[in-house]
Amino acid sequence: MFEPNSPRLVSVRGVDVEAPLGGTMLIIANDDQPGVIGEVGTILGRHRVNIANFALGRSERGAIGVVNVDEDAGAPRALDAAIDELRRVPAIREAWVVRLS
């Protein structure tokens, strides 16, 4: 915790990353190569999933992206569809959603 009432995620699988800890978070483990972040943004945009915050951590083993997103109550399956598409990107090893309230 860096300041009162502002919890932060600071490490994922040994990779340093700093992201707000709360709400809906998409966590991505990927190869550290050009174009991955752009592809993530394009896919989320295509599914109308709004990015609230994007944090990236890198190590010799690859990269971890933490994407805080706004879930649209009117389109509850949009994020699920985006995750399915992200998992098919060759450079993305894993993608999962964490929902905290």
Image (cartoon, rainbow, N blue to C red):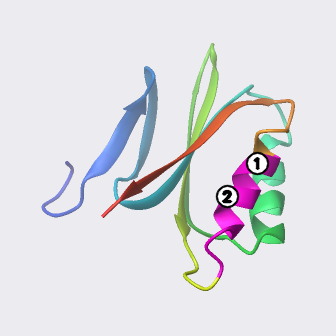
Q: Residue furthest top?
A: 60
Region rendered in magenta:
75-85
The answer to whether residue 96 is above or below residue 99 is above
Q: Which residue is drawn at 78% across and 69% down?
A: 47
Residue with the most extreme left position: 4
Q: Which amino acid does label 1 sit on?
A: Asp
Residue located at (82% from left, 49% from top) = 85
**In the figure, is residue 68 to the left or right of 14?**
right
Dot 1 surroundings within 10 Å: few (below 14), some, or many (20 or more)? few
The residue tagged with tag 2: helix, strand or loop? helix
**Mark 1–mark 2 CB contact (< 8 Å):** yes
Q: Is the magenta stretch mostly helix, strand or loop?
A: helix
Tell me the tag on residue 80. 2
Q: Which of 75 and 12 is in front in this view?
A: 75
Residue denoted by label 1: 84
In the image, taking residue 73 as reference, residue 36 lies left or right, namely right
For the residue pair 58 and 80, the one nearer the viewer reads as 80
Q: How far apart are marks 1 and 2 (CA)?
A: 6 Å
